[in-house]
Amino acid sequence: MTGTFIKVCGITRIADAEAAVAAGVDALGLVFHPASPRVVSVAQAATITAAVGPFVTTVALFVNATTAQVEAVLAATGIHLAQFHGDETPEYCRSFRRPYIKAIRMAPGLDAAAAAARYPDAAACLFDAWHPRLAGGTGDVFDWSRLPDIAPRPLILAGGLTVANVAAAVHGRRPYAVDVSSGVESAPGQKDARRITEFVAAVRSA
Protein backbone atom coordinates (compact mmCIF):
# COMPACT_ATOMS: atom_id res chain seq x y z
CA MET A 1 0.00 0.00 0.00
CA THR A 2 1.40 3.34 -1.05
CA GLY A 3 -1.15 5.62 0.57
CA THR A 4 -4.40 5.88 2.45
CA PHE A 5 -7.55 5.26 0.45
CA ILE A 6 -10.45 7.70 0.76
CA LYS A 7 -14.17 6.99 0.80
CA VAL A 8 -16.81 9.71 0.79
CA CYS A 9 -20.07 8.35 2.15
CA GLY A 10 -23.61 9.67 1.96
CA ILE A 11 -23.52 10.73 -1.70
CA THR A 12 -26.99 11.81 -2.86
CA ARG A 13 -26.32 13.85 -6.01
CA ILE A 14 -24.49 13.19 -9.28
CA ALA A 15 -22.68 16.52 -9.00
CA ASP A 16 -21.30 15.54 -5.59
CA ALA A 17 -20.16 12.16 -6.90
CA GLU A 18 -18.42 13.80 -9.85
CA ALA A 19 -16.74 16.36 -7.57
CA ALA A 20 -15.45 13.57 -5.32
CA VAL A 21 -14.08 11.62 -8.27
CA ALA A 22 -12.43 14.74 -9.69
CA ALA A 23 -10.77 15.34 -6.31
CA GLY A 24 -9.26 11.85 -6.36
CA VAL A 25 -11.57 9.96 -4.01
CA ASP A 26 -11.31 6.17 -4.30
CA ALA A 27 -14.79 5.08 -3.19
CA LEU A 28 -18.29 6.49 -2.86
CA GLY A 29 -20.86 5.37 -0.30
CA LEU A 30 -24.60 5.35 -0.97
CA VAL A 31 -26.93 5.04 2.01
CA PHE A 32 -30.03 2.82 1.94
CA HIS A 33 -31.09 3.37 5.55
CA PRO A 34 -34.51 5.11 5.60
CA ALA A 35 -33.78 6.98 8.84
CA SER A 36 -30.72 8.71 7.39
CA PRO A 37 -30.88 12.24 5.94
CA ARG A 38 -28.55 10.87 3.24
CA VAL A 39 -30.80 8.03 2.07
CA VAL A 40 -31.11 7.45 -1.67
CA SER A 41 -33.55 5.44 -3.72
CA VAL A 42 -32.48 2.55 -5.92
CA ALA A 43 -33.13 4.72 -8.97
CA GLN A 44 -30.96 7.54 -7.61
CA ALA A 45 -28.17 5.11 -6.82
CA ALA A 46 -28.26 3.55 -10.26
CA THR A 47 -27.99 6.99 -11.86
CA ILE A 48 -25.05 7.97 -9.66
CA THR A 49 -23.12 4.74 -10.24
CA ALA A 50 -23.63 5.03 -13.99
CA ALA A 51 -22.36 8.61 -13.93
CA VAL A 52 -19.06 7.80 -12.19
CA GLY A 53 -18.26 4.71 -14.24
CA PRO A 54 -16.81 1.33 -13.31
CA PHE A 55 -13.36 2.35 -12.04
CA VAL A 56 -14.58 4.09 -8.88
CA THR A 57 -15.60 1.69 -6.12
CA THR A 58 -19.22 2.11 -5.04
CA VAL A 59 -20.48 0.94 -1.66
CA ALA A 60 -24.06 0.36 -0.53
CA LEU A 61 -24.64 1.03 3.17
CA PHE A 62 -27.38 -0.90 4.98
CA VAL A 63 -28.59 -0.94 8.58
CA ASN A 64 -30.44 -4.12 9.58
CA ALA A 65 -32.08 -4.35 6.15
CA THR A 66 -34.04 -7.38 5.03
CA THR A 67 -32.39 -9.85 2.69
CA ALA A 68 -34.82 -8.88 -0.06
CA GLN A 69 -33.94 -5.19 0.29
CA VAL A 70 -30.22 -5.81 0.01
CA GLU A 71 -30.60 -8.16 -2.94
CA ALA A 72 -32.80 -5.66 -4.79
CA VAL A 73 -30.27 -2.84 -4.37
CA LEU A 74 -27.29 -4.93 -5.41
CA ALA A 75 -29.09 -6.34 -8.45
CA ALA A 76 -30.41 -3.00 -9.73
CA THR A 77 -27.45 -0.69 -9.18
CA GLY A 78 -24.27 -2.59 -10.02
CA ILE A 79 -22.74 -1.43 -6.72
CA HIS A 80 -19.47 -3.21 -5.95
CA LEU A 81 -19.49 -3.63 -2.16
CA ALA A 82 -22.01 -3.90 0.64
CA GLN A 83 -21.41 -2.18 3.98
CA PHE A 84 -23.37 -3.40 6.98
CA HIS A 85 -23.71 -0.82 9.71
CA GLY A 86 -26.16 -2.46 12.09
CA ASP A 87 -26.41 -5.66 14.13
CA GLU A 88 -26.02 -8.01 11.19
CA THR A 89 -24.65 -11.48 11.88
CA PRO A 90 -21.63 -12.89 10.03
CA GLU A 91 -23.90 -15.45 8.37
CA TYR A 92 -26.19 -12.71 7.07
CA CYS A 93 -23.30 -10.60 5.76
CA ARG A 94 -21.74 -13.41 3.79
CA SER A 95 -25.04 -14.72 2.43
CA PHE A 96 -25.06 -12.21 -0.44
CA ARG A 97 -21.86 -13.62 -1.95
CA ARG A 98 -20.54 -10.11 -2.41
CA PRO A 99 -17.46 -8.53 -0.80
CA TYR A 100 -18.60 -6.66 2.28
CA ILE A 101 -17.41 -4.17 4.88
CA LYS A 102 -18.58 -4.60 8.46
CA ALA A 103 -18.91 -1.45 10.50
CA ILE A 104 -18.05 -1.67 14.19
CA ARG A 105 -19.50 1.16 16.27
CA MET A 106 -17.18 1.88 19.18
CA ALA A 107 -19.61 1.66 22.08
CA PRO A 108 -18.27 2.20 25.61
CA GLY A 109 -16.59 -0.95 26.87
CA LEU A 110 -16.68 -2.70 23.49
CA ASP A 111 -13.91 -5.19 22.82
CA ALA A 112 -13.27 -3.94 19.28
CA ALA A 113 -10.84 -6.72 18.36
CA ALA A 114 -13.35 -9.39 19.41
CA ALA A 115 -16.13 -7.63 17.52
CA ALA A 116 -14.05 -7.55 14.34
CA ALA A 117 -12.98 -11.17 14.78
CA ARG A 118 -16.61 -12.26 14.39
CA TYR A 119 -16.37 -11.30 10.70
CA PRO A 120 -13.25 -13.10 9.43
CA ASP A 121 -14.40 -13.00 5.81
CA ALA A 122 -15.16 -9.26 5.73
CA ALA A 123 -13.20 -7.43 3.04
CA ALA A 124 -12.50 -4.78 5.69
CA CYS A 125 -13.76 -3.59 9.06
CA LEU A 126 -14.80 0.03 9.50
CA PHE A 127 -14.61 1.58 12.96
CA ASP A 128 -17.04 4.41 13.64
CA ALA A 129 -18.21 6.50 16.56
CA TRP A 130 -21.04 5.10 18.65
CA HIS A 131 -24.32 6.89 19.24
CA PRO A 132 -27.22 5.42 21.25
CA ARG A 133 -29.82 6.26 18.57
CA LEU A 134 -27.98 6.91 15.30
CA ALA A 135 -26.20 4.35 13.15
CA GLY A 136 -23.63 6.74 11.69
CA GLY A 137 -23.02 10.09 10.07
CA THR A 138 -23.03 11.80 13.47
CA GLY A 139 -19.87 13.84 13.06
CA ASP A 140 -18.63 12.47 16.39
CA VAL A 141 -15.04 11.37 16.97
CA PHE A 142 -14.08 8.42 19.15
CA ASP A 143 -10.81 7.71 20.96
CA TRP A 144 -8.53 6.42 18.20
CA SER A 145 -6.33 4.69 20.76
CA ARG A 146 -9.13 2.11 21.06
CA LEU A 147 -8.61 0.93 17.49
CA PRO A 148 -7.63 -2.75 17.50
CA ASP A 149 -4.93 -4.45 15.51
CA ILE A 150 -6.81 -6.48 12.90
CA ALA A 151 -3.86 -7.01 10.52
CA PRO A 152 -3.61 -8.31 7.87
CA ARG A 153 -7.21 -7.32 7.19
CA PRO A 154 -7.79 -3.70 6.13
CA LEU A 155 -8.94 -1.21 8.76
CA ILE A 156 -11.11 1.74 7.77
CA LEU A 157 -11.35 4.71 10.13
CA ALA A 158 -14.55 6.77 10.26
CA GLY A 159 -16.29 9.04 12.73
CA GLY A 160 -16.04 12.80 12.78
CA LEU A 161 -13.17 13.10 10.33
CA THR A 162 -12.58 16.57 8.86
CA VAL A 163 -9.82 18.44 7.09
CA ALA A 164 -8.73 19.62 10.54
CA ASN A 165 -8.08 16.18 12.03
CA VAL A 166 -7.67 13.63 9.24
CA ALA A 167 -3.92 14.14 8.85
CA ALA A 168 -3.43 13.38 12.54
CA ALA A 169 -5.60 10.28 12.16
CA VAL A 170 -3.55 9.03 9.25
CA HIS A 171 -0.24 9.78 10.97
CA GLY A 172 -1.30 8.23 14.25
CA ARG A 173 -3.17 5.11 13.19
CA ARG A 174 -2.06 4.36 9.60
CA PRO A 175 -5.47 3.07 8.48
CA TYR A 176 -5.98 1.36 5.14
CA ALA A 177 -8.66 3.94 4.39
CA VAL A 178 -10.56 6.86 5.87
CA ASP A 179 -14.30 7.38 5.49
CA VAL A 180 -15.88 10.84 5.64
CA SER A 181 -19.47 12.02 5.38
CA SER A 182 -20.58 15.02 7.43
CA GLY A 183 -17.03 16.39 7.48
CA VAL A 184 -17.28 17.42 3.82
CA GLU A 185 -20.87 18.65 3.80
CA SER A 186 -22.51 22.05 3.63
CA ALA A 187 -25.74 20.42 4.89
CA PRO A 188 -26.76 16.80 5.59
CA GLY A 189 -26.64 14.96 2.28
CA GLN A 190 -25.11 17.89 0.39
CA LYS A 191 -21.39 17.58 -0.20
CA ASP A 192 -19.17 20.61 -0.67
CA ALA A 193 -16.66 20.27 -3.53
CA ARG A 194 -14.13 22.57 -1.86
CA ARG A 195 -14.25 20.64 1.40
CA ILE A 196 -13.81 17.35 -0.45
CA THR A 197 -10.77 18.70 -2.29
CA GLU A 198 -9.25 20.02 0.94
CA PHE A 199 -9.93 16.74 2.73
CA VAL A 200 -8.24 14.72 -0.01
CA ALA A 201 -5.26 17.06 0.05
CA ALA A 202 -4.94 16.66 3.82
CA VAL A 203 -4.93 12.87 3.52
CA ARG A 204 -2.40 12.86 0.70
CA SER A 205 -0.09 15.26 2.55
CA ALA A 206 -0.09 12.95 5.55
Image (spheres, grey):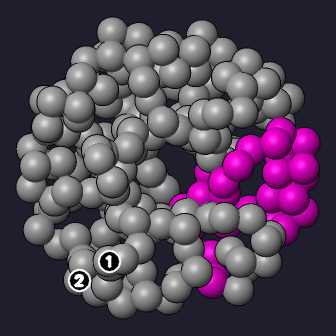
Instruction: Say what secondary structure mark 2 lies in.
Output: loop
Q: Is residue 152 above or below residue 35?
A: below
Q: In this view, does 97 lie to the left or right of 159?
A: right
Disc 2 marks a residue whose amino acid type is Gly
Disc 1 marks a residue whose amino acid type is Ala
The residue range painted magenta reads: 61-90
Q: Position of residue 130 (x, y in %)?
A: 34, 62
Disc 2 vs disc 1: which is toward the camera?
1
Count of all numbered marks drawn on residues in the image: 2
Instruction: Say what secondary structure mark 1 lies in.
Output: loop
For the point 45% across and 40% down, the residue is 7
The residue carrying mark 2 is 109
Q: Position of residue 77 (x, y in %)?
A: 83, 39
181 and 169: which one is in front?
169
Residue 124 circle label: none
For the point 44% across and 51% down, the residue is 136
Locate the N terminus by quadrant.
bottom left
Question: In terms of sequence position, does the residue under pointer 2 or pointer 1 come before the other?
Answer: 2
Q: Where is residue 25 in the image (x, y as percent from the top left)?
A: 44, 29
Q: Is residue 63 magenta?
A: yes
Q: Is residue 25 above or below residue 127?
A: above
Q: Where is residue 196 in the image (x, y as percent from the top left)?
A: 36, 20
For the point 23% across and 34% down, the residue is 203
The residue carrying mark 1 is 151
Question: For the residue carrying disc 1, how many other residues have a C-alpha within 10 Å: few (<14), some (14-19), or many (20+)?
Answer: few
